[in-house]
Image (spheres, rainbow, N blue to C red):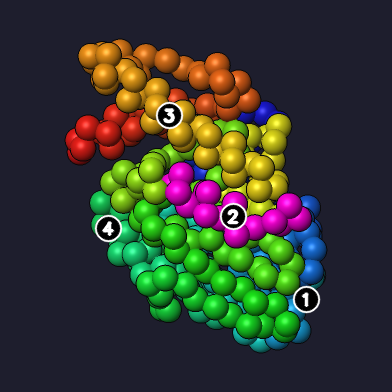
């Protein structure tokens, strides 16, 4: 996969700015059915998950306006019913940027109670409030839907990638959508301004691992093209191990009396050779800087 194409997919290039108009509304080529009427959609931004039945469409995350239109134009190929639900895994724009499109097409939006607060704060900072649609239904801990024999649960485990992340479980399909709690072999975005907590993220991954089984299929928000956006619970341990090593490396540097600049002067952990840095925004130095701020309690 070419670098520009990858950056477009993970949402680091302005929506549509380098995409040919004819590619914006392709249908099934962007859809990947998984099992039990659950699938994923990849175009630009965080991976969309979906469930269809005779009773409902349930969508996980909304990417940006153009991909949202493409998704809505294509999902009916796989079925669907009168009820329309969108669940946001967290507030970031590459997961909520298409909310308004879904809202205008009759979808009810659900998210953790911190998501609309963080989403509005980010929109105010970026002067994009007019482009937002916020969750009408929010929850503090979990929210469960029972649709056509499938139980869908959005579960909040505490601050991690942000302080509003939910894991979306499809019980009968044995599939879990992790949102940005997994950057599969990518240096992740750790949103300290959005309430991220690396120690909490580690705890979350261990908890989700224990709640899954070897057959659980996971959907990831983003992934290194060589590893993709689906995987097993073993991939959760890879992410957990990376975050643990990140804190350990940073703590050793602090204890050795190294400066912040000295500690962040590294581009790759030898222990994690498969991790990719697609941009300075998603890089090991950025990760270490956030770890340093967490460990030193510095804003």
> Magenta segment range?
201-216
Q: Which residue is mark 1?
A: 79
Residue 210 is one of the magenta-drawn residues: yes
Q: From this viewpoint, which residue is outermost toward the left? A: 298
The CA span between labels 3 and 2 is 22 Å
Q: CA distance from mark 2 to mark 1?
A: 33 Å
Q: Earlier in the sequence, mark 1 or mark 4?
A: 1
Q: CA distance from mark 4 to mark 2?
A: 34 Å
Q: Earlier in the sequence, mark 2 or mark 1?
A: 1
Between residues 37 and 249, which one lies in front from this camera angle? 249
Decide if residue 72 is on the left or right side of residue 114. right
Tag in front: 3 or 1: 3
User: Which residue has dot 3 on it?
Assistant: 246
In whole angstroms, how far apart are the C-alphas of marks 1 and 4?
36 Å
| Residue behind mark 4 | 121
Q: Which residue matches tag 2?
A: 210
Which comes before the other along the chain, label 4 or label 3? 4
């Amino acid at each position: 996969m070419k670098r520009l194409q990858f950056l477009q997919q993970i949402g680091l290039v302005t929506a549509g700015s380098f995409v040919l108009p004819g590619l914006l509304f392709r249908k099934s080529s962007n859809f990947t059915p998984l099992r039990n009427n659950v699938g994923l959609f990849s175009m630009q931004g965080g991976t969309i998950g979906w469930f269809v039945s005779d009773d409902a469409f349930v969508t996980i995350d909304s990417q940006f306006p153009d991909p949202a239109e493409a998704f809505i134009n294509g999902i009916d190929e796989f079925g669907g019913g009168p009820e329309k639900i969108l669940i946001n895994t967290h507030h970031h724009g590459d997961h909520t940027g298409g909310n308004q499109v879904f809202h205008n097409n009759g979808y009810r939006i659900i998210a953790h109670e911190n998501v609309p607060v963080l989403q509005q704060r980010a929109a105010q900072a970026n002067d994009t409030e007019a482009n937002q649609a916020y969750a009408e239904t929010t929850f503090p801990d979990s929210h469960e839907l029972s649709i056509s024999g499938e139980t869908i649960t959005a579960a909040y485990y505490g601050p991690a990638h942000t302080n509003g992340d939910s894991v979306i479980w499809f019980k009968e399909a044995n599939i879990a959508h992790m949102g940005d709690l997994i950057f599969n072999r990518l240096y992740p975005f750790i949103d300290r301004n959005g309430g991220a907590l690396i120690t909490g993220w580690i705890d979350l991954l261990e908890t989700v691992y224990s709640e899954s089984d070897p057959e659980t299929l996971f959907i990831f928000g983003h992934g290194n093209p060589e590893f993709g956006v689906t995987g097993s619970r073993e991939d959760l341990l890879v992410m957990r191990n990376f975050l643990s090593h990140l804190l350990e490396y940073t703590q050793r540097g602090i204890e050795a009396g190294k400066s912040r600049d000295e500690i962040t002067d590294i581009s790759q952990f030898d222990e994690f050779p498969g991790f990719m840095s697609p941009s300075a925004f998603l890089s090991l130095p950025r990760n270490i800087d956030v770890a340093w701020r967490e460990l030193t309690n510095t804003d």
